[in-house]
Amino acid sequence: MPSLGATRVHWPVVAWIRLKVPPPPPPMMLTVGPPPPPDPPLDSLASEPISTDPRKRVYASEEEVDGGILRLIWDSDDPELLEAELRAPYYGARLPPERVRAFWALVKERTRSLGPLPVDGADPSP
């Protein structure tokens, strides 16, 4: 899974999950033209400029967690998907199963305001 935007650390992605977000309500159009881009689904997501494509709207948040960095990423071009990744200094080794379960629980806690979200893809699975 390619990571969008820049991150503070250059540790490898050791676990990721892609969640389906409920579609936002359609915008009320007061003028003729294309609708405005949707807003990010979580308040914690901040705009993250992409230097190679300034038109692209990517939002992300990072926080330090036990032994790594939790990163949530949302791209306005694909508004129905929210990606979460765990970056940690595990080079050439798999993440222990208890750390995978802790990562999934942490993502579930951070996305609680959106309700239960179906999983579109993940690696590794708990």
Image: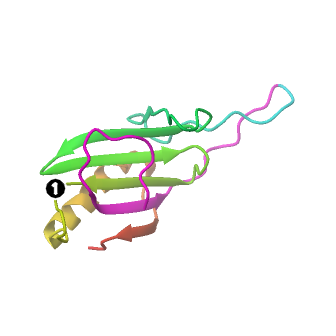
Callout 1 amino acid: Pro
Residues rendered magenta in the picture: 1-30
Q: Is residue 123 shown above or below 9?
A: below
Q: Report whether 15 appears left or right of 56.
A: left
Q: Report whether 119 appears left or right of 55.
A: left
Q: Is residue 63 shown above or below 109?
A: above
Dot 1 falls on a residue whose secondary structure is loop
| Rendered location of residue 31, percent (x, y) | 84, 25
Q: Please give the name of the residue rendered at 33% of the width and 41% of the height, measured from the top-left corner.
A: 7
| Residue under pointer 1 | 89
Q: Please give the name of the residue rendered at 23% of the width and 47% of the height, measured from the top-left corner.
A: 69
Q: Is residue 95 shown above or below 56?
A: below
How many residues crowd mark 1 within 10 Å: few (<14), some (14–19), many (20+)? some
User: Of residues 42 and 90, which is closer to you in this image?
Assistant: 90
| Rendered location of residue 1, percent (x, y) | 42, 62
Q: Residue furthest front?
A: 52
Give the position of the C terminus as an image quadrant. Answer: bottom left
| Rendered location of residue 73, percent (x, y) | 43, 46
Q: Residue furthest right?
A: 32
Taking the magenta stretch, the answer to whether it contains residue 73 is: no
Q: Please give the name of the residue rendered at 18% of the width and 50% of the height, measured from the top-left corner.
A: 68
Q: Residue furthest top?
A: 31
Q: Report whether 117 appears left or right of 86.
A: right
| Rendered location of residue 76, percent (x, y) | 58, 43
